[in-house]
Amino acid sequence: MTQVLAISFSLNGKTIAVDVPAHMLLIDLIRDRLDLKGTKRSCDMEVCGACTVLLDGEPISSCTTLAVDVDRLDVTTIEGVTPPDGLSPIQQAFVLHGGLQCGFCTPGFIMAVTALLKTTPHPTDAEIRHYLDGNLCRCTGYTKIFEAVKSLAGRQDAA
Amino acid sequence: MLPSPFQFERPSTIADAVRAVGESGDGMFYAGGTELLLALKMRVIRADRLIDIKGIPGLDCIAVNGMNEIEIGARCTHRKISGDPVIREHVPALASLCAEVANIRVRNVGTIGGNLCFGEPHADPPTMLAALNARLVLVGSRGTREVHADDFIRSEMETVREPDELLRVIVFPRPAGPVTYRRFKHGERPSVNVAMTWSLNADGNTIRSARVRVGALGLRPQPLPVVEGALRNVAVAEARQAIETALPAALDQLEVNADRHGGADYKRHLAGVLLLRSADEAVTAGGSWLK
């Protein structure tokens, strides 16, 4: 019989309580139960970064995280960093620098960059490359993404 | 992909966790899940119950103990180890290794104990921990035992750990000389890696003993006894030449598989290149070791 556990966590700043099967993955809770479709499933094996969400501010792969593991913690998805009107400074920088084409990897990149700039507001080129090493983009060739992040590295209001 | 359903338990002591895993059916310890959940999702293994050890206090401590040894709790994430002041001071090469494992998301939740227990041949920590002469402390229903890192991984994805034994802590002597780790990789996992530790004499100019381990070539990390012998009581300044001389014979003794990371000759060659670069690094570090 499937075990169901009651969990409560903060999702994009709002506390929610849900019952989840023990074996449910966080990405399925987010996308299918909570209907937040911005988080993308791609490689499904923690390599590509498309499913990146923040758990207590740190990037994780929601495709390979159990929903029960976010109990009492703080989850942020792409919807949580997108203003009601318009785009965040990070999103604007991606648009301005052509840091996306098909856009499928973009939510994951935005989440990773959000976490990076929160802890390291002025990352060096090497820090940017190292941090984003685990986010894959098959369109841009990365240079445009790197330039977008670099344009934010010196700004105070980036995050 | 979804894993098959399992029961989920959150014990708060090691004893309860060991008991829970030992109960009926297939129970497994669970922490970061970066390896285990992947395998469950692909249905290459199955578990009736996951025993979450994240709520057990004390499994994520890092400290120098009274025997001048470094202890790393098995549940420490790669991220924690990479930023830990004790590791950065005494074993900076291990901090750097952990800062480069897989990617930022895996490092945030993946643990060093889980990495070891998975026994994946293309992994970073096992080679390094074998070179550091680490012991792994296992707690099971029949008591506690220590296993040398060299003896822990038996083969691909296979260790000597019993299913109801929890890896509690990793212990190794505080290094008395340079420690190096180098790898070559195509993707996220090392294709070949080399770890080397030197214990220097009190004057800092001579190598008392050396440990060299090569990983990802075969089923488990392998020692290079010919190189270790060649480095015994050798002046630091002569170390590179000693390794170069011993290298062809040493590389011949390695068991090397061809796999998707490359052919056997290619991987064997890479091991030699990495070892010589490590030698240069250790010679440079050796000069400043006593300062």
Image: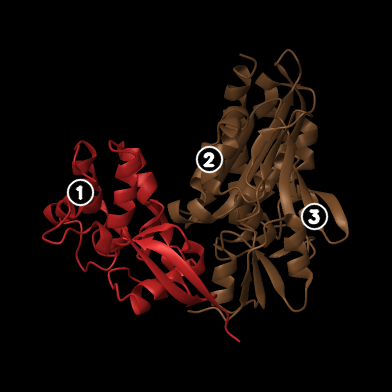
Between B152 and B16, the one nearer to me in the picture? B16
Pointer 1 and pointer 3: residues touching (CB < 8 Å)? no
Q: Amino acid at mark 3?
A: Val
Q: Which mark is residue B82?
A: 2
Q: Position of residue B184 (x, y in %)?
A: 53, 49
Chain of the residue displaying label 1? A
Element type at mark 1: helix
Q: Is residue B240 above or below residue B47?
A: above
Using the rendered view, name the quadrant where residue B141 is placed.
Answer: bottom right
Q: Position of residue B32 (x, y in %)?
A: 56, 59
Between B91 and B288, the one nearer to me in the picture? B91
Dot 1, how many residues are within 10 Å of its Cα: few (below 14), some (14-19), or many (20+)?
A: many
- Total marks drawn? 3
Same chain for the residues under marks 1 and 3 in the image? no
Label 1 – label 3 distance at C-alpha: 50 Å
Same chain for the residues under marks 2 and 1 in the image? no
Label 2 – label 1 distance at C-alpha: 28 Å
Label 3 – label 2 distance at C-alpha: 26 Å
Residue in the picture at 78% in, 70% down: B22
Q: Which mark is residue B57?
A: none
Using the rendered view, name the quadrant where residue B121 is placed.
Answer: bottom right
The quarter in which the N terminus of chain A is drawn is bottom right
Colour assigned to chain B in the rendering is brown
Q: Which mark is residue A148?
A: 1
Residue identifier under label 3? B139
Q: Amino acid at mark 2?
A: Ser
In the displayed image of the protein, which residue is found farthest to the bottom? Answer: A1
Element type at mark 2: helix
Q: Position of residue B134 (x, y in %)?
A: 75, 42
